Amino acid sequence: MNIKAEVAAMEKMCTGELAERYAELTGQSVRTRHRAYLIRKIAWRLQANAEGDLSERARRRAAELANDADVRLMPPKRPPEVPEGAPRRTAAVSRLDPRLPAPGEAITKRYNGRALQVVVLADGFEHEGRRFKTLSAAAKAITGTHVNGFRFFALGGER
């Protein structure tokens, strides 16, 4: 059996034909319609049939490793614990980036010979009577091109 020729022939098959070929080789139906995945799985099965499958020792070890019932993939969803006596931050305050001045203060910059002023709001920014959700949106309105708002207004520092 020429596996390379088989793989080349699979490249010309439609997804339905690949699913049928997979079912024919493995005896199981497939739920996916991802062409590249099906081709890889079929090629692996063809190679395993032609050259031999995993040894019994390898199968046992794989079964041991697959027994991951005690492994969590996602951490539990609970808020972080705040130590006693630590100040609690409200949702509005914790959303603000520490690189930004406090709401109500202005960010100024000289650009193309004019002085710009963007006022920081609790829920966004204001420039020349227009409101923006992000500092980058305000910078884009000023420059006409996408630019990182923190870089444009030279607001560096750690996040």
Image (cartoon, rainbow, N blue to C red):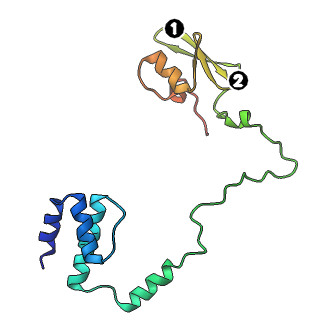
Relative to residue 109, is residue 150 depicted above or below?
A: below
Q: Disc 2 on helix, strand or loop?
A: loop
Farthest-out residue, bottom: 56
Residue placed most toward the observer, 147 or 9: 9
Residue at 73%, 37% (x, y): give it.
91
Would you name the residue on which mark 1 appears? 114
Residue at 30%, 77% (x, y): give it.
27
> Local crowd at mark 2 within 10 Å, few (<14), some, or many (≥20)?
some
Residue placed most toward the observer, 14 or 118: 14
Residue placed most toward the observer, 114 or 105: 105
Q: Is residue 31 left or right of residue 38?
A: right
Image quadrant where one finds the C terminus = top right
Residue at 58%, 32% (x, y): give it.
156
Q: Disc 1 on helix, strand or loop?
A: strand
Three-letter code, disc 1: Arg
Rendered location of residue 121, percent (x, y): 67, 22
Image quadrant where one finds the N terminus = bottom left
User: Residue 72 appears in which quarter of the rendering?
Assistant: bottom right
Rendered location of residue 146, percent (x, y): 43, 26
Relative to residue 142, is residue 51 depicted above or below?
A: below
Rendered location of residue 13, percent (x, y): 17, 60
Q: Looking at the rendered structure, which numbered label has been put on residue 103?
A: 2
Q: What distance separates the C-alpha of mark 1 from that of mark 2?
A: 23 Å
